[in-house]
Amino acid sequence: RVHNILVGDLVFDSYVRNYNHYQNPKTDTRFLIILFQAIFRTKRITKLFNERNIKFTLIPTSAYVSNGAIAARVALENKIRVIEPYLYGSREITKQTVKNGYHYEKVKKNFKNIQKVKNKSANKFFDDRFKRFKIGVYTGKKDFLFQNKKKLKYTLNDKQLIKYGIDRKQYKKIILFACHAFSDAPHSLGNKFIFTDYYDHLLQTLNFIKKNKNDDVLWLVKKHPSSEYYGENGVVEKVIKKINYKNIKLFPEKINTINAIKFCDAVFTGRGTIGMEFACYGKLAITAGEAPYSYMKFNKVFHNKDSYFKYIKKISNIKTINPSQSIIARKTLFFLEMENRNFLNKSKILDQD
């Protein structure tokens, strides 16, 4: 903290953003430069706020040791409103969004509105996305900027999965561990996270699994779709190779997400969207902090490591969630994806941009 303003998370996120420093964070020259920038900017911007009668703050980003992020923290300490452009509109940054993440607070605020979404609308959205593949992101029919360049088009049956070392009959449970992008601002979704960052979450979880061996459970580790974009190719593979435990395997890259949801019994994620997608199918998501959807209580969220690791010991007894929770998950997914859509028709005067 500088002048009682929290900046440590911004310093850490800036430090791990490049050069894969999340693998071995330390107080090196680069860290000290970022720390200096954070201190200097916080003091300078605080002085500016004290000198000027500022009533309102518009920032370009709330992440990293940027002038915008620092200005946001200074403004919040002085009880000044902060607005950030976001997707098709804007969002207000508050102390609660810094703590829990903007999307969590958005869902919390709209709890009653989400419940009012008609079951028919939520189920149709679910069918279009996951069954009819009209949206198609998770079947490889549509590419986003951060998606892998390879089309994830394969849907394998139980016999075909055996070729990848995944034999359903051999294990009582198959659990997916879905990685985040390690470099991408691990605290931008809120500071409520029980591990140092997403890489630390992966390492500690897999090491605990090896130490507390359970032959009834197979763990599949799925790389984040944006790992190539962030220069993280090979990182997850090296972790799995170093741990060297037969019940921890790399998730086959060519298999699409829908297929993964169907043959895996649950998913562990820091706080990724995939947890909500599993819940749509009636399967439990386990998160290591507040996720955008965790206020709706269809996932299992942990706020300390002791209870998190105790839960892993009993993972072979994991059960599906009830149908009403799946409906809530579909409504939440519908809300989070549709609230930022631009429903305007194409203009004859203005271009698409």
Image (cartoon, helix red, strand yellow):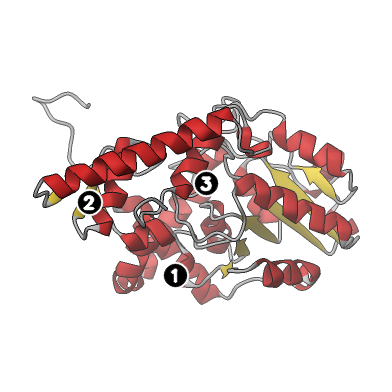
Give the mark, 1 or 2, whose residue is nearer the N terminus.
Answer: 2
Separation (CA) of disc 1 from disc 2:
23 Å
Tell me what residue is drawn at x 42 percent, y 53 percent.
1
**Residue 124 in view of the camera:** no
Residue position for label 2: 82
Give the mark, 3 or 2, whose residue is nearer the N terminus.
Answer: 2
Separation (CA) of disc 1 from disc 3:
20 Å
Classify 10 Å Cα crowding around label 2: few (below 14), some (14-19), many (20 and above): many
Residue flagged by tag 3: what amino acid is it? Pro
**Residue 190 in view of the camera:** yes
Mark sitting on residue 339: none
Residue flagged by tag 2: what amino acid is it? Val
As helix, strand or loop, the secondary structure at mark 1 comes to helix
Q: Quadrant of residue 115?
A: bottom left
Give the x, y percent position of residue 109.
Answer: 30, 68
Separation (CA) of disc 3 from disc 2:
21 Å
Residue flagged by tag 1: what amino acid is it? Tyr
Q: Is 301 left or right of 122, judged from the image as shown?
A: right
Give the x, y percent position of residue 351.
Answer: 17, 23
Proximity of marks 1 and 2: CB atoms separated by less than 8 Å = no
Residue position for label 1: 295
Up the image or down, 301 lies above or below 177; here it is below
